[in-house]
Image (tube, rainbow, N blue to C red):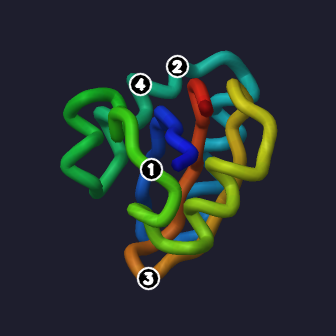
Amino acid sequence: MARAHALHILVKTQEEADALKQQLSKGAKFGDLARKHSLCPSGKKGGDLGEFRRGQMVPAFDKVVFGKPTLEVHGPVKTKFGWHLIKTLSRG
């Protein structure tokens, strides 16, 4: 079963996610922005979701984590929880 380790930032609107992605592109630290802005409890850990298996997250989230290049910020990705910026650290 495929496993991955990812970080994410969860916000309410696409505009917020776009603004955060722009800050990241200018050198802001993912963990700092997650701690400050993420609505997910993982925000306290810099957005770290730890390791999880394919199928444990909602499909749109899984698609990015298991299908897009690692170590890049992807999104905004919309799920029933809100808008995510996702960074996959490792996959195996």
- Most foreground residue, 63 or 21: 63
Front tag of 3 and 1: 1
Q: Are marks 4 and 2 in contact (CB under 8 Å)?
A: yes
Give the label on residue 31, or none: 4
Q: Is residue 86 visible?
A: yes
Disc 3 from disc 2: Cα separation: 26 Å
Q: Residues within 10 Å of mark 4 (few under 14, many from 20)?
A: some
Q: Which residue is mark 3?
A: 80
The residue under the point 56% across, 62% down is: 61
Q: Which residue is mark 2?
A: 29
Q: Are marks 4 and 1 in contact (CB under 8 Å)?
A: no
The reply, left or right, for residue 52 in relation to residue 29 is left
The secondary structure type at the circle numbered 4 is helix
Q: Which residue is mark 1?
A: 53
Residue 77, image x, y percentages: 63, 65
Kind of residue sitting beneath label 1: Arg
Front tag of 1 and 2: 1
